[in-house]
Amino acid sequence: MPPSERKAILSAPFSAALDITDVRARLSAKRLGTRFHYFAELDSTNTRARELAESGAAEGEIVIAESQTQGRGRLGRRWESPPLSNLYLSIVLRPGLPPKHAPQITLAAAVALVETVGSFLPRPPVIKWPNDILIDGKKLAGILTEAACDTECVQYVILGIGLNLNYRAETMPETLRQRATSMADRAGENLCRETVLVRLIHDLDRCYGELEESGFAALRPRWETHFGLRGRRVRVELGDQTIIGRAQGIDHEGALIVETDDEQRRSIIAGDVIPLET
Ligand code: BT5
């Protein structure tokens, strides 16, 4: 990054509201960011995006909020969403993918997120399958993808992203502090949210385009490069079942491959992965 650009990134005002006009002016993404729905506060950007998609919002429309009162993770978990410091956005997608490939959008978004964050930090983060972005085992970003499908096709997908940007560890709730981090904590200084947002939308646009045009096979090598748990012992929780084994990577469709202690190869399409010490 040239020094002049770096200076611009670091000298921007940090607790100000996002300048969406500036973001729009700097965007040259093909499909994402066609329209912004900006809110100072929302319950959840995913919920709002879903309402918009149901009433005909076009692909690429983005809902973005400065804070969320009921930011959501998977399985009803909460996403901490304090005001004016992070990015909380949900993008309406209308992909030409069969429903069984809709989860690959999460994987493509994870590649984009790692590439975006890695371009601002000395060390890139890693992906924890399927939807977490981590640095040194601490969570920096999460993805919540919600799809509406009929039997043959996907009507829409809401791609929700929460990225901890200028969220300093000392302001996080105690329960989160041990497990979460932010770009500013890693960079040692605050970053300009508009610059990161523009870069993120471009990277998402590119990875989503690659997924639609060439399928997940085109993205899989990059996903594998960024996968942080290869060879690690993991516990995978599948609702009523638990699997313990070594994470091997993902298959061509995006399922996690785990080799269990009795040397069985399991393909996991949905679940929670917990890294184990040994
Ligand atoms: C996720 O769920 O990681 C998906 C998070 C998606 C949030 C975005 S924000 C914009 C959009 N609108 C929404 O309402 N949601 C999306 P999951 O894998 O279930 O992880 C949730 C867990 O992450 C929580 O149980 C906490 O342990 C942890 N967590 C909560 N807030 C966090 C934060 N700000 N930073 C890091 N970790 C957090």
Image (cartoon, grey):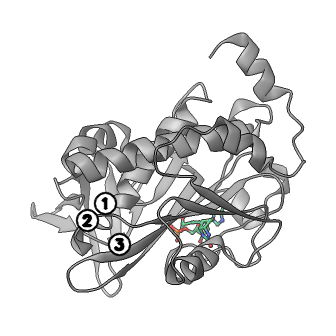
Could you tell me which residue is drawn at 29 percent across and 50 percent down?
A: 211
Regarding ligand 1, which quadrant of the image does it lie in? Answer: bottom right
Q: Say which amino acid is labelled 1.
A: Gln
In the picture provided, is 133 more to the left or to the right than 212?
A: right
Q: Are marks 1 and 2 in contact (CB under 8 Å)?
A: yes
Crowd tier of the residue under label 1, counting other residues whose Cα lies within 10 Å: few below 14, some 14–19, many 20 or above: many
Figure quadrant of the N terminus: top right
Whole-number angstrom distance, CA of label 1 to CA of label 2: 10 Å
Q: Nearer the viewer, residue 149 or 55?
A: 55
Could you tell me which residue is drawn at 57 percent across and 54 percent down?
A: 34
Element under disc 1 = helix
The percent position of residue 132, horizontal first and vertical second, equals: 48, 56
Whole-number angstrom distance, CA of label 1 to CA of label 3: 14 Å
Q: Say which amino acid is labelled 2.
A: Leu
Element under disc 3 = loop
Residue 67 image label? none
Q: Provide the residue designation for mark 3.
A: 271
Q: Provide the residue designation for mark 1.
A: 104
Whole-number angstrom distance, CA of label 2 to CA of label 3: 22 Å
Q: Provide the residue designation for mark 2.
A: 97
